[in-house]
Amino acid sequence: MRFEIRGENRLGITRDVVNVLTDQGLDIRAFEVTTHHIYADIPAIRPERFPLLATALKKIPGISDITEIDRLPTERRRAQLHATLAALGDPVIAVDANGLIAQANPAAQAIAGTPEKSLRDIDITNILNEPSIKDLRQSKFRLPEHEVTLGGQTYLLQVEPIGHVDDGSDAGDDEPWGGVMVFHRAARLGRVITALQDRSHTGFDDIIGDSRAMTRVKSQAQRLAGIDAPMLILGETGTGKELFARACHRASTRSDQPFLALNCAAMPEGLAESELFGYAAGAFTSARRGGKPGLLELADGGTLFLDEIGELTPYLQAKLLRVLQDGRFRRVGGTDEIAVDVRIISATNRDLEAMSHDGTFREDLYFRLNVLGITLPPLRERIEDILDLAKFFIDRTAQQTERATPYLAIDGLDWLRAHDWPGNVRELENTLFRAVALLDGDVLGARDLTNAATGTTSAPDTSSIDTAHDTTSPPNTTAAQTDLITEALSQEDFGAGLDLLEREMLVRLYPDYPSSRKLAERLGVSHTSIANKLRKYGIGT
């Protein structure tokens, strides 16, 4: 039976408790003492005898209560530690100061191919034959993170020393009791990288666009996302190929595994090879000690997105083909084969089929990549989506630049819809960012967008414009419309059809005529009418 004794924190109270237990001939299996608490495990006590023992213990001065418990504090902490270690997917091994294994979690036992009992009290070098491990004690269990091989698998090893309890003594403060060794799988690191990089958790519902073209391609992509096979995404630059790749990963059975990306056109062949396949220790002069896992290892179990796949060199095309065929590869400078389970989603704006015919891209690799395929429409074929896209980018830019969200004028929307957008959604995003960031007022019009698209910041030259037209009117406003607005301004109320044009004109003119009297004189209407309109639209307040 296990029980807890609560009482005062006085000198000699523990001795008094032990005396009572000894006088009753009880064998104490475990005994723990903390401030105000004494815990004991005595197997010989039966439930019917416990009340008599409790009565005897309560006669001790300072004892207030005795209750039965299921576990001692140390047993509870040990059970919690075992549960925590068992829940970890990575191998964890604790060693003592002599390098003997004190504890190993189930993942470590499985990798070592032996039950924990067999691992205990054996030297760590028996299962981990690494030069750095032999110097653990000399390094006081402080080693830089580096790659090791355990049970034929590659891990990133992290070692943390187990220090002394701070009991106020100075003896041996610099000597740890041992250390904890954590073996991180490359794929687990890949999941961490994915979590840090993809905070938006992009899904198909987050992709903006309800046009017929986008509805069709999203529906097709959703159907193909759940099929565990390579996918090729075709589309012009800036159409959102990576966005669709992330959405396909999130809708697949691999959604809780890593999603990593590599732009194949952004680096030379040697760098692209080491990024994709990793490199072994000593592969080249500047190689990191212990080697480095590549994206294929980091994405194990998940998805690897290869953008601009058409830019891969013939050498890398051949290496990638083997991964697609049997899921195996060798690191740069390595001799050991590594097996991975990775879904490859690739993308390009080039015609891979034509390239495979003229020999610039391997035909067998093209067929391996194009098991599933979707083609994203350019922005000029989904004009209906421009308004929703523009609102999103304008709102986001306003938040990023910490300003009020500007209003998109009708002529501004017309300009966006009329533009050809060779850079597609990416060009639209960049143009709106520049336009909003440089905007002085709170209305985004065609002139602002033209300046943003061309990189112009100064106002256009209006000296050659016919003076019969009001040069300060909103873009695309005709002289007849200007006269109509001016007439409407003189009225106390008018139809909502002129609301937008009226507001635009007042916003444009107010910086040059910054008072209701000057603006009224410019437009030839009463001061009272202009003052009412300025208050109505919140201009100049």
Image (cartoon, grey):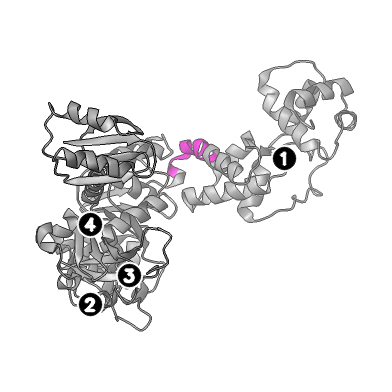
Q: Which residues are magenta?
A: 381-390
Q: Amino acid at mark 3?
A: Phe
Q: Judge depth for marks 2 and 4 and give the one in front.
A: 2
Structural distance between the alpha carbons of marks 2 and 4: 20 Å
Front residue of this view, candidates 114 and 38: 38
Q: Is residue 57 above or below residue 290?
A: above
Image point (27%, 58%), residue name? 187
Percent across and percent down for residue 501 are 70, 29
| Label 4 SS | loop
| Label 3 SS | loop
- Closer to the chain start, of discs 2 and 1, is 2
Mark carried by residue 342 = 4
| Label 1 SS | loop
Give the dominant element type of the magenta stretch: helix, strand or loop: helix
- Closer to the chain start, of discs 4 and 3, is 3
Mark carried by residue 334 = 2
Q: Judge depth for marks 2 and 1 and give the one in front.
A: 2
Decide whether residue 383 is among the magenta residues: yes
Residue 385, visible in the rendered structure: yes
Structural distance between the alpha carbons of marks 2 and 1: 61 Å
Image quadrant in which you'd find residue 300: bottom left
Circle 1 residue: 441
Image point (29%, 80%), residue name? 283
Mark carried by residue 141 = 3
Front residue of this view, candidates 416 and 428: 428
Image quadrant in which you'd find residue 296: bottom left
